[in-house]
Image: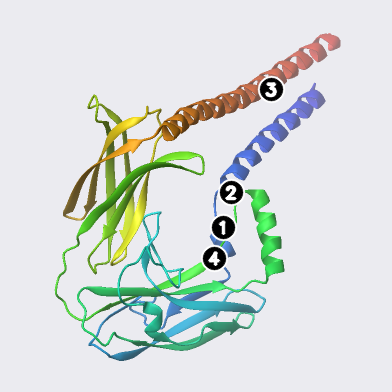
Amino acid sequence: MTHTYSHWRWIFFTVFTVLGLMCCFLLISRTVNAASVDFSVKTEDKKSPAAVQRQITAGQVFTVKLLFTNNSAHSQNLSISCNTAFTGDTGNVQYNLENPKPSYFGSVNFNQLINGPKTVKLAAHGKVVKNYTIKSPDKKFKGVVVGGFYVRQIVSKRKLAKTSKNKMAMGYTNVFAYVIPVILSQSNQIVHTKLVLQKTYSKVTHNIPVVIARIANVTPTFFGELSFKTRIVNVKNHRVMSKSSQNNMTMAPLSRFDYHVLLKKPLPAGKYLLNLTATSGQRIWHFDRTFQISQHVAQSTESRRHTSSDQWKLWLAVILGLIVLLVALSVGMYELGRHHKNSKK
């Protein structure tokens, strides 16, 4: 009996271990492993190692020292680009494009203000300091000019293809980069942020029906803690068809982005009203704009409902299957134990 019990206990342990590993796999496949980052960048300013913020005069030149550190046992090559800040469609400030237009519509190109090395080679476990000179625009400006150092590893095409292939099999691809924001101002004069809703329309992108609200920050201000709340109202019967919200967004000066409102419920074709409220600190902006949902978008919202329903049925079937398997194993263990006990008698 002891042998049989130990045998089935081992089976149960194996089953639950496999299930645990499956759960971990699903979690890991959607998570970037931060421990894999094997280099770091910071300024030599102990008070502000992760950013540069200066109030300067027109035409003034100053130097920024960046410390590059290799945390790995192999040499590395790093690429450094100095780019203008813009607002990406995820609703966050980005620095990874040399020419971010039309997302950015300011007159100052940050990459023309900075001189310094474009690449850095690091020995294994090595450190190096590089100097970068930054020149303020010759003309006076209000608010702030924002850009940043965008630092990433230089990986050979062969290694990148191999890495991407392996990590895509696991469900994710890592792209590591460091950003050191640079915020320049010429005075303490407060500029009040003005947001504008430039355009509203519906479309289907990557088989997902969405409403696009193009939001523009038309002032030279850099701010965060931006939140959106939206309602979609049927103009014909005044019914609220959808509600959504999003927090923790940021916006770069003189930039715009397309805010995506997912259409999760079936909506018939017709005329709708987008009611959007933006909040940042004590500032609140209200926007109302009508738009059309075409027959194509309406059909996509209906198809999405069926797809979501099918996915839920699939997961339900998997869960029920696992429950049945565990119950069957439990019954089997009980019957074997009872049979073994009866045979002894």
Residue ID for mark 4: 176
- Earlier sequence position, callout 1 versus callout 3: 1
Q: Is residue 50 shown to the viewer in this render?
A: no
Q: Amino acid at mark 2?
A: Ile
Q: Which mark is residue 325?
A: 3
Determine whether, in the image, residue 182 is placed left or right of residue 157. left
- Earlier sequence position, callout 4 versus callout 3: 4
- Is 112 drawn above or below residue 159 in the view shown? below
- Earlier sequence position, callout 4 versus callout 1: 1
Q: Which mark is residue 251?
A: none
The quadrant of the rendering that contains the C terminus is top right
Return the x and y of residue 182 as percentages of the image width and height: 35, 76
Residue ID for mark 2: 28
Residue drawn at 60 percent across, 26 percent down: 314
Q: Nearer the viewer, mark 1 or mark 3?
A: 1
Q: Secondary structure at mark 1?
A: loop
Q: Amino acid at mark 1?
A: Asn
Q: Secondary structure at mark 2?
A: helix
* Residue 311 sits in quarter: top right
